[in-house]
Amino acid sequence: MERNSEKYILTDSMEWENLGGGVSRKFLGFDNQIMMVKVKFDKGAIGSPHSHFHTQATYCAAGKFEFEIDGQKQIVNAGDGVYIEPNLVHSAVCLEEGILIDTFSPIREDFMDGSGVSYFGDKEA
């Protein structure tokens, strides 16, 4: 199935999707090959350890996070980037309230249809 987001995604009028555990998101653009998501973390919120077959590149737009990728920890601040190879176990802890811009290739179908459990926690929380 071919799919594309709108050409312009103006986030001021968008509601945050609450993922629980102090994490919310907004979809910024996607097609079948790529997806960009803005993810807001409260201080202390955790992106639980998980892996997926997607390539991921993340930009830290605000805040401070401790990432762990394949057993290696690194503090990431606003302006820093993170690259995560497919299938590596990774996680993040928000040390200072912040925003990450996650980019995935291909698109995260589990994000689109809700079939997978969110790695940020219970969506109903």
Image: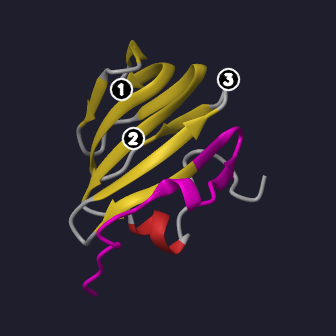
Residue 37 to residue 14: above or below: above
Which residue position is annotated with label 1? Answer: 69
Where residue 12 appears, as percent x and y from the top left, is 54, 54
Compare marks 2 and 1 and give the one earlier in the sequence.
Answer: 1
Would you call the spot at circle 3 few (<14 residues within 10 Å), some (14-19), or many (20 or more)? some
Element at badge 3?
loop
What amino acid is found at the position of numbered circle 1 in the picture?
Ile
Residue tagged 3: 44
The numbered mark, 1 or 3, whose residue comes first in the sequence reads 3
Residue density around tag 2, few if under 14, some if 14–19, many if 20 or more, within 10 Å: many
Residue 13 versus residue 19 in the image, above or below:
below
The residue identified by callout 2 is 101
Depth check, front residue: 38 or 12: 12
Q: Quadrant of residue 82?
A: top left
Q: Secondary structure at mark 1?
A: strand
Please name the residue shown 44% across and 59% down the image. 10
Image: magenta residue range: 1-24
In front of the other: 121 or 23:
23
Q: Are marks 2 and 3 in contact (CB under 8 Å)?
A: no
Q: Residue at x 39, y 41 (%)?
A: 101
Task: Name the spot of residue 91 as percent of width and height, x first.
Answer: 47, 31
* Label 2 to label 1: alpha-carbon separation: 17 Å
Q: Amino acid at mark 3?
A: Gly
Q: Residues within 10 Å of mark 1 (few under 14, many from 20)?
A: some
